[in-house]
Image (cartoon, rainbow, N blue to C red):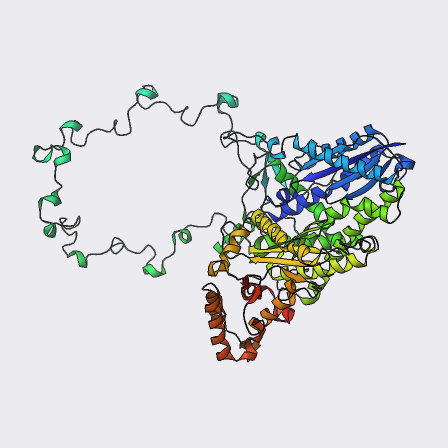
Amino acid sequence: MDVYAVVLSTAGNQNYIFGSNKRRENVGASHLITCVEGEWLDRALAEVGAPGVDGREQRVEEHGIEVVTANAGGVTMLVRDENVGRKVVGIITGAALREAPGLDVCGAVSEAVTWGDTEVVARCIADARELLVVARAGRRGPRLRFPGVPIAARCGSSGLPARGVVEFPEGGPPPGRRPPAAGERPVEEQPLMQGRLLAEGRPPAEKQPSIKARPLTKRQSPAEERPPAEGQPLTERQSPMEGRPPADGRPLTERQSPMEGRPPADGRPLTERRPPAEGRPLTERQSPAEERPLAERQSPMEGRPPADGRPLTERQSPMEGRPPADGRPLTERQSPAEERPPADGRPLTERRALAERRLPAEGRVPEARSAPSLAKLHAFDRALLRLAGKMGLCVEADDEAVARRKLSSIVDHLNHKAEWVAVVHADGNGMGKVFERFPSLMAAQGVRLAADYVRRYRALSEGVDECARDAFRSALEKLRGAGWSAGTDEPPVLPLVLGGDDLTVVCDGELALRFARDYLEGFTRLAGEHDAVGGVLEHVEDLRGLGACAGVAIVKRAYPFHRAVHLAGELTDEAKVVKKKLGQDRSALSFQVLFESAYADLERLREQQTVDGGGTCLTGQPYVVGDGGDAEWARHRHWRDLERQVAALTAREDGGLVISAAQAHELRSALFRGREAAQSRFQVVSTWLGKDAVQGLAHDGSLFWQDGSTHRTGLLDALNAAPFLRSKDAS
């Protein structure tokens, strides 16, 4: 029996999700990526698979098709018929073009191989992945699908050519604008946007998402909305000036300028008026003030006779001589708006309240949006249900409405209210290496049949996915127990990417570090306990288990989101050094609190934290999370070391901080003046407060430790993390 490997994958997921600062578009984009291994794959299996059998349970030996892996925007399948594989690729990529414009989805089908041997099937899947790379390199990028011209409107979110206009209802005020009136639903239960779908292919009976959009090509200009003059069609209507008769009967090109038609004030031609002073050309004439010395010249008002015979200092102001309109002093008079009678007979306060209710939702006017932006917005409602399931909020069908409301409030908080917003990106250690070496792992364990190999391959993929999901829920449950300051029903955490060993979360800044720490600890523990993951990897000497690394970028809410995501990715790569130092079964975390609005390049930021000609580094990152072993490299780099320093900085006594904000600021400033200046300032603070008060900041009595030829300190990291790690979390 011959089989073919079919591989589909998305590319540029981070750019697709985080190309906009609109949280609703971020959530909708994350859902559209999951449709590749979800809704669209099920659609393809229903069309080409065996009737009456669940597509996910079909096996290539019995039904001619089998799903090996399906997660993180990718699908790997085996089919007996090459045409079936090509049809699956066509169905999924066609759905992406219609329902998720701008999403880069590509597929490939391998050559036929004989079913039976493990190594042959493994090579078939690897060949299909190589073909996928070649196919993607030979096609245009998704942004080239949207050509534009200079006169076309641009999307206010993505910058692509606009396809339609998103309109917001008059009666939908932004969340938090006012409390609901009697008998009115709370704001969280009101749809923020209403309208109809523009994308082709949606059945008319399907519930339309809450967006009102009009195609740009069908909108009327202000001139089009006027009734046609004399029954003329639009193309023959006159311009606003076209219908006016010429003032003097002459053609437009011969008409006079605005000054030309005015009669001279004294009856003389313009050229005879006002002879030049002293017969000199204009460039040589003196102004009247020039003819006298500077000290004797009059001001413009000096030569005018007083209107009432009084000196200038005693004259009335322009308003002084006017009688008050209502007999009241000026300070008590009404403003011009108050003097006007209300058009509808209602008081001014009532009119203002009504106007406030008619403000556009989220405080925005109708916006031009591109096809990708509209597709992401239309997917928002479906995305909320998927997120609710991943977060464990939708256990029963009756919980859907409640889950939607809770998640909508989280989206609105992160979009409008949160002062600090964080991007948390986590990635498993060496998963590519694990799957690359998986055939040799199976051979070492005596697996020879292709069916057994595929079953274990699928179990490993699903096991990693399950560990990531359970670790996320465990970290979220810990946040629920610890509490949060935002006024949301659930901790303000949004998992935008949660598939395989990848995790990308947007959350409130105050929760980011705690969440990342708890997630890494949970993922490492669960991966070691899972039979399909830890049970396989423990047989390999240099693997031993599966860890993960995370990067946390904490920025202001208005900071460009794609830059924050890029910084989080760089921080994750920085944390990956733990694999070389301690092994890939260890976990580590790097973070950065960005106080500036400039472009965040991690290399530049780390250079700014290096003083003394490169001999002193003011950061101890990355920090090891979980068991770090006895390695010298991890001695001062454990997360507990950072928490100890934060606890010392935030400790309180008699209602105030033990180390005051001024003293902490002096320590921060001294760090950038060099190691000796920082150590001297630390000694001064220690003498002033006592060694017991500051011992949590020191390592063996010093702020610094030796790391090869470099001196390092974690004090700057603790100063940056202190506002986001509460004392009870750091104790």
**Is 162 on the left or on the right of 294, as rendered?**
right
Residue 691 in the image, given as x and y percentages of width and height: 54, 79
**Is 253 on the left or on the right of 217, as rendered?**
left
Residue 292 in the image, given as x and y percentages of width and height: 8, 47
**Is 728 on the left or on the right of 54, as rendered?**
left
Placement of 478 over or under 168, stated as above or below: below
Placement of 39 over or under 616, stated as above or below: above
The residue sitting at 15% across, 52% down in the picture is 306
Label tally: 0
Residue 15 in the image, given as x and y percentages of width and height: 62, 43
- The image quarter containing residue 115 is top right
Image quarter in which the N terminus is found = top right
In the displayed orientation, state which residue is furthest to the front.
709
**Is 84 on the left or on the right of 253, as rendered?**
right
Image quarter in which the C terminus is found = bottom right
The answer to whether one can see residue 659 in this image is yes
